[in-house]
Image (cartoon, rainbow, N blue to C red):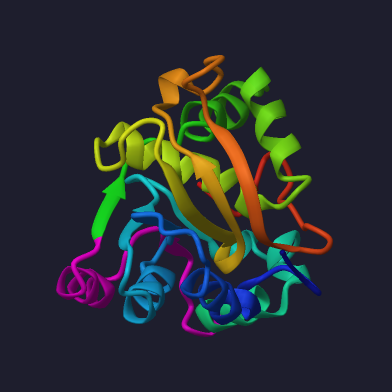
Amino acid sequence: MKVFERPGPVNTDETIHILQNAPRELEFLVVASVTGESAVKAAERIKNRKIICVTCPQGMFWEVNAMNADLFEKIPELKARRDEWAKKRLERVPLSITDENKIKLKELGVEVVRGTIPLFGPTFSMRLHLRKTTSLDIVAKTLELISPGTLVCLEAVMMATDAGIIPEGELVYACAGTEMGLDTAWIVKACASANMFHQTKGFRFVEMLAKPALALAPSININYLR
């Protein structure tokens, strides 16, 4: 297992290298990728697995003016991206695959999944609009103690399984990052979100391949997302 010195997009290429050379002959690699950039990089280099790009649902935005703290202040690559957007006088940036990357993913034969995030969508609205936290928030924040990418790996694989692309019970590779890029990789057992806690059919973390040494997680309200 690889332990990175710090979290962030700086680890993207090495995470892909680890997955490129992973010995288990598993059919699927799930890449959590907001803009499609990480999924394109993975698909360009990994040719012996079916790459699935899982992205965010409609209606989510980065609020650039609220990015002066939290992860976008602590991680150099995220801070640089925030400064780039601010220099362009952007106020809101959609969490969605760029038009350029849509074309590249199609050419590379990558399936794209876009849907409700199991431990985020409705619970985020409850935190933001009703000022209420739920038990699912506790599950999510606990997984983020390992790394935010660990939480996102679980969510991305369940989204791909819910979409019918991955069979339940399949062992798959999954990778994700801290807000952008990749810094976490796992082998997991897939399940539909409705079976997450099932005694036999439920989701399982099988083998960790890479993670940041000390995870940095966003605050529970994630003020820069809307």
Please state the extent of the stretch shown in magenta in the rendering: 86-110
Q: In this view, does 120 lie above or below 40?
A: above
Figure label count? 0
Give me the residue at 73% from left, 52% from top.
217
Q: Nearer the viewer, residue 9 or 76?
A: 9
Residue 22 colored in magenta in the image: no
Residue 44: % across, % down: 33, 80
**151 lies left or right of 192:** right
Give me the residue at 71% from left, 79% from top.
76
Which picture quadrant has residue 106?
Answer: bottom left
Q: In this view, does 141 lie above or below 46?
A: above
Give me the residue at 63% from left, 49% from top.
207
Residue 132 seen in render: no
Residue 49 seen in render: yes
Q: Nearer the viewer, residue 47 or 153?
A: 47
**197 lies left or right of 41:** right
Residue 210: % across, % down: 67, 63
Residue 144: % across, % down: 71, 45
Q: In which quarter of the image is the N terminus?
A: bottom right
Residue 105 colored in magenta in the image: yes
